[in-house]
Amino acid sequence: MNSLYLHIPYCQRKCGYCDFFSLPQASTAELDEYVQLLLCELEQLRQQAEPLPLQTIFFGGGTPSLLSVEQVASLLRRVEDLFGFSPDCEVSLEANPGTLSAEKLHGYRQAGINRLSLGVQTLNDDYLRLLGRAHSAAEAREAVVSAREAGFENLSLDLIFALPGQSLVQLTEDVEGLLAIQPEHLSLYGLTFESGTQLYQRLQAGELAEVDEQVYADSYLLINRLLTAAGFEHYEISNFARPGYRCRHNQVYWQRRSCFALGCGAHSFNADGWGERWHVPADLLRYRRKLAAGESPMVSLESFDRQAAMAETIYLALRTADGLSREQFKASFGCYPEEVFPGAFQRHAEHLQLSADRWSFDLQGWLLYDHLISSFL
């Protein structure tokens, strides 16, 4: 095991577009209890996993920046005691701008966080209110300034696009505003209206309208054009980075390598054999009871056979600019990918390109990704 994910399911409030498992903002005592549960689960994991020095650690959520400096520091100290860190270990923490202060950012940096992922989403205050975000554009900019002053040299910003009624001019202003902040990394999320969310209810009531496919495509291509012109590499469907600043933790997922995940609602992957996924059910009471009884809260979610492992390897690799290595695929499965899925490769030849050893989608292929990739599944 070289990568670890820690899930913090608490939020200040539910955003209008979010359908993920989340719990209302907790008191300090509740967060302390949750950190103790994570520490207990860490001890269990140490009994199961080989203690290789960790190369990536990721605090995700939810809103991990609701944790105090001492809570984050205590988790990192124990992780280091149990597993050790590689010299260049990437330690990421997701944060909402409205939960940060200069003091907290200095504390996080001293505790060992070296990569900050800020949920900016947009620099348009009207759209921030529409999305139900708890911060303003000014607070987002202030958070970036404070993060730099605290010593963070690796900042990732989130951007939501395809917002209701959003023009390409407004989107350009958003992207240029984010570029002016000078992040090392940007992650994109096209807005979707998920069943059960506040925005979905407003959509059903006719108060909001989704953008059409052409506007979505034009928006995606515009973002690609602006960011690549600014020196970013479009290294995964939804992710851009300056050279040397790809998110190494996320690459673990796309390369289908093992990553153990702890916390209520977390999902793990063990790459041994053909692979197996585990999860901790999103039930805090169950999570607490299992750990109190000395039992693992994880349950098996999916075990892969050879065919399913081949399909998922292709599915994940074709999300990335690096693409799918034919030779690595053959080393793992004993055949080339086009031998297993000849019809899919022929059917999508217009958008698939072979460069040296690697298959990859072109930009239009990424736009049509969900449709095209279904041929491989």
Image (tube, rainbow, N blue to C red):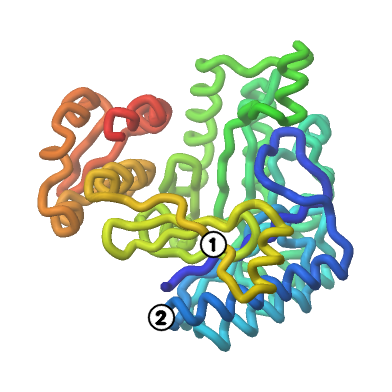
Residue that appears at 58% across and 32% down: 190
Residue 41 appears in the figure: yes
Q: Position of residue 15 (x, y in %)?
A: 76, 39
Q: Secondary structure at mark 2?
A: loop
Q: Residue furthest top?
A: 206
Give the Cα separation between the discs numbered 2 and 1.
18 Å
Number of disc labels: 2
Q: Position of residue 5 (x, y in %)?
A: 55, 64
Residue beneath label 2, please? 50
Q: Amino acid at mark 1?
A: Met
Residue that appears at 75% across and 53% down: 96
Quarter of the figure with residue 31: bottom right
Q: Position of residue 149 (x, y in %)?
A: 75, 69
Identify the disc placed on residue 298. Answer: 1
Report crowding for label 1: few under 14, some 14 to 19, many 20 or more residues within 10 A (C-alpha): many
Q: Amino acid at mark 2?
A: Glu
Q: In the drawing, does residue 188 fall left or right of residue 177?
A: left
Q: Secondary structure at mark 1?
A: loop
Residue that appears at 48% across and 59% down: 268
Camera-side residue: 62 or 227?
62
Q: Are marks 2 and 1 in contact (CB under 8 Å)?
A: no
Residue that appears at 52% across and 68% down: 4
Residue 151 appears in the figure: no
The quarter of the image holding the C terminus is top left
Please say if 108 is above or below 273. Answer: below
Earlier along the polypeptide chain: callout 2 or callout 1? 2
Camera-side residue: 332 or 122?
332
Q: In the drawing, does residue 73 fall left or right of residue 351?
A: right
